[in-house]
Image (tube, rainbow, N blue to C red):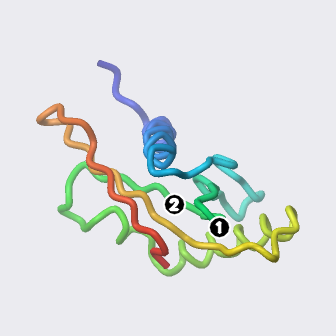
């Protein structure tokens, strides 16, 4: 089996996360919304009355903390900046917004399906 590079693994995990979110009642609006060099938001989705800006993080083990712990203050601030640009571009000022994190734990050793944890209103 071919080993995936970091970008391919990230894309694969974002597909897993989007599929999972759909089963949770989310409607996917956009994936990999990029703003120049500022960065990107992995998934933008709607859940009920909320527009959700979603960061997807994965880990192969919890040795260095949970996936959500990797979404540090700097990353959160960056996601907020990009979200505000998206809100302004799409004139969504009257909507409710939320920042969610989807954690994916991958256990390649035991060949089990990934464990997925959705953290609503994560920051």
| Element under disc 1 | loop
Q: Is residue 94 above or below residue 41?
A: below
Residue 89 quadrant: bottom right
Task: Assign a secondary structure to mark 2.
Answer: strand
Quadrant for residue 84, please give it: bottom right
For the residues labelled 1 and 2, the Cα–Cα distance comes to 19 Å
Residue at image point 11% right, 35% down: 110
The residue under label 2 is: 55
Please state which of residues 27 and 32 is positioned toward the viewer in this rendering. Answer: 27
Residue at x-position 58% and y-position 72%: 98
Query: Residue 33: where, in percent of width, then height?
Result: 70, 52
Q: Is residue 107 left or right of residue 71?
A: left
Image coords of residue 14 (percent x, y): 49, 44
Q: Residue furthest left?
A: 110
| Residue in view at x 45 percent, y 51 percent | 24
User: Compared with residue 94, is residue 20 higher up or lower down, i.e. above or below?
Assistant: above
Relative side of 121 to 116, left or right: right
Circle 1 or circle 2, nearest the eye: 1
Give the residue pinned by disc 1. 49
User: For mark 1, does the 10 Å Cα neighbourhood hold few (<14), some (14 to 19), or many (20 or more) residues?
Assistant: few
């Amino acid at each position: 089996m071919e080993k995936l590079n970091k970008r391919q693994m990230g894309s694969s995990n974002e597909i897993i996360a989007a599929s999972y979110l759909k089963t949770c009642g989310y409607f996917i609006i956009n994936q990999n919304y990029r703003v120049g060099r500022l960065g990107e938001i992995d998934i933008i989705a709607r859940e009920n009355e909320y527009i959700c800006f979603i960061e997807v993080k994965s880990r192969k083990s919890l040795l260095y903390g949970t996936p959500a712990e990797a979404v540090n203050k700097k990353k959160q601030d960056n996601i907020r900046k990009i979200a505000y640009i998206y809100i302004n571009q799409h004139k969504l000022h009257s909507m409710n917004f939320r920042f969610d994190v989807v954690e994916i734990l991958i256990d390649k050793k035991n060949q089990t399906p990934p464990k997925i944890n959705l953290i609503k209103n994560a920051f």
